[in-house]
């Protein structure tokens, strides 16, 4: 018997696909949807982590959950995933394009190869997900929702995260464009913009790399602005579910007291 969560059974029977679901915000989001009654497909390039998320989601939600090992930047792999999911589990009702990587370094010191790495995952991964699964949703004609994990970095210029911030600003804009296009088909599109959240990306990736002192100053400035020290991924997951339920366009995940940053 599962314990009723905050959004108890709100997503009962719905099929939810979350990318970047092996850890952090993606894993917390998979659990939150499972708790709300959804069937969950946990996707990650870390296949073991995705399988583990699915295993735990089944326990949390007492519903079906599956893990899939896919690199979101690989268009063909995403096409294959969409075809497999449609054939085996059905058309996705809610897609959460959440997979992302961090990479710090000044603009002038970031190589083209590093720019491509970040854009391939953070931007192209989202484009592939939106287009491939968005088409399936539109063709089915029963509505749906797409949530893209952008970042507060999308509108907070940074000297240490130019590629990351640029990728997230692009995700914010593509979400708004797609939202306008899909509104007539009852498909909502939301962009989530969290500040600093306690996950692997902020502790082990090259976010913490190139210039540690500068990075520390950035984080301190950000937490002064957003008050987000020790912000848990579960709060972002909750914001993602609320964005779907309330069909919100852009959702900065910041304490309400910093209300100036709420956009819509
Ligand atoms: P995380 O590092 O814990 O999770 C990211 C997940 O994405 C990992 O499981 C990783 O294996 C997966 N991933 C990376 N590249 C992939 C690819 N090519 N294909 C499939 N999966 C891939 O980090 P976190 O924080 O949970 O990040 C989730 C999203 O939230 C990212 O888009 C990130 O940019 C965004 N975000 C995170 C913030 C933070 O402070 N942690 C703040 C704002 C946004």
Image (tube, rainbow, N blue to C red):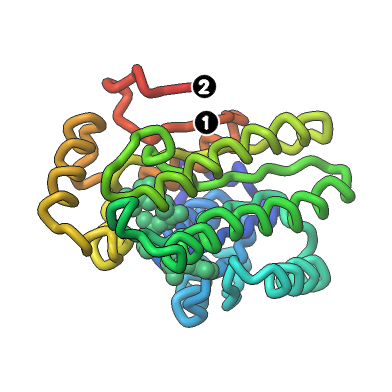
Marks 1/2: CA–CA distance: 6 Å
The residue that disc 2 covers is: 264
Q: Is residue 140 above or below residue 185?
A: below
Ligand 1 located in image quadrant: bottom left
Q: Is residue 223 above or below residue 52?
A: above
Residue contact between numbered discs 1 and 2, judged by CB atoms under 8 Å: yes
Image-based side of 82 in relation to 120, left or right? right
Q: Say whether residue 9 is visible.
A: yes
How many C-alpha atoms fall within 10 Å of the one at disc 1: few (<14), some, or many (≥20)? many
Q: Quadrant of residue 109?
A: bottom left
User: Which residue lies at the image location 38% right of the left edge and 35% below the top edge?
Assistant: 253
Residue in the picture at 49% in, 49% down: 167
> Left or right: 26 with respect to 188?
left
Is residue 2 positioned above or below 68 on the image?
above
Q: Helix, strand or loop at disc 1? A: strand
Residue to which mark 1 is pinned:
250
7 and 175: which is toward the camera = 175
Left or right relative to 53: residue 257: left
Question: Is residue 234 something that shows in the picture?
Answer: no
Q: Residue furthest bottom?
A: 48
For label 2, the SS is loop
- Label whose residue precedes the other's in the sequence (1 or 2): 1
Q: Nearer the viewer, residue 3 or 235?
A: 235
Q: Which mark is residue 13?
A: none
The residue most toward the top is 260
Residue at x 45%, y 63% (from the top left corner): 112
Question: Where is residue 220 shown, x and y percent of the image?
Answer: 15, 41
Q: Position of residue 79 (x, y in %)?
A: 75, 69
Residue density around tag 2, few if under 14, some if 14–19, many if 20 or more, within 10 Å = few
Q: For disc 1, does the CB lie below 8 Å from ligand 1?
A: no
């Amino acid at each position: 018997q599962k314990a009723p969560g905050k959004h108890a059974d709100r997503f009962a029977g719905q099929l939810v696909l979350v990318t970047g679901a092996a850890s952090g915000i993606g894993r917390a989001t998979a659990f939150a949807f499972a708790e709300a009654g959804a069937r969950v497909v946990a996707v990650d390039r870390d296949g073991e982590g995705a399988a583990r998320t699915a295993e735990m989601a089944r326990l949390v939600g007492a519903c079906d959950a599956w893990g899939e090992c896919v690199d979101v930047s690989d268009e063909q792999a995403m096409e294959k995933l969409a075809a497999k999911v449609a054939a085996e589990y059905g058309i996705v009702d809610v897609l959460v394009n959440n997979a992302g990587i961090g990479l710090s370094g000044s603009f002038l010191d970031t190589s083209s190869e590093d720019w491509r790495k970040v854009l391939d995952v953070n931007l192209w991964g989202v484009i592939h997900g939106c287009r491939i699964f968005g088409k399936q949703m539109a063709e089915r004609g029963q509505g749906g929702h797409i949530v893209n994990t952008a970042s507060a970095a999308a509108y907070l210029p940074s000297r240490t995260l130019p590629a990351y911030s640029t990728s997230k600003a692009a995700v914010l804009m593509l979400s708004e464009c797609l939202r306008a296009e899909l509104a007539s088909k009852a498909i909502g599109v939301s962009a989530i913009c969290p500040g600093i959240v306690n996950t692997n990306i902020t502790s082990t990736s090259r976010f913490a790399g190139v210039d540690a002192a500068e990075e520390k100053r950035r984080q301190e400035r950000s937490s002064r602005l957003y008050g987000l020290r020790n912000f848990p991924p579960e709060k972002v997951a909750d914001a993602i579910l609320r964005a779907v339920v309330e069909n919100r366009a852009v959702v900065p995940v910041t304490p309400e007291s910093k209300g100036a940053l709420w956009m819509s």
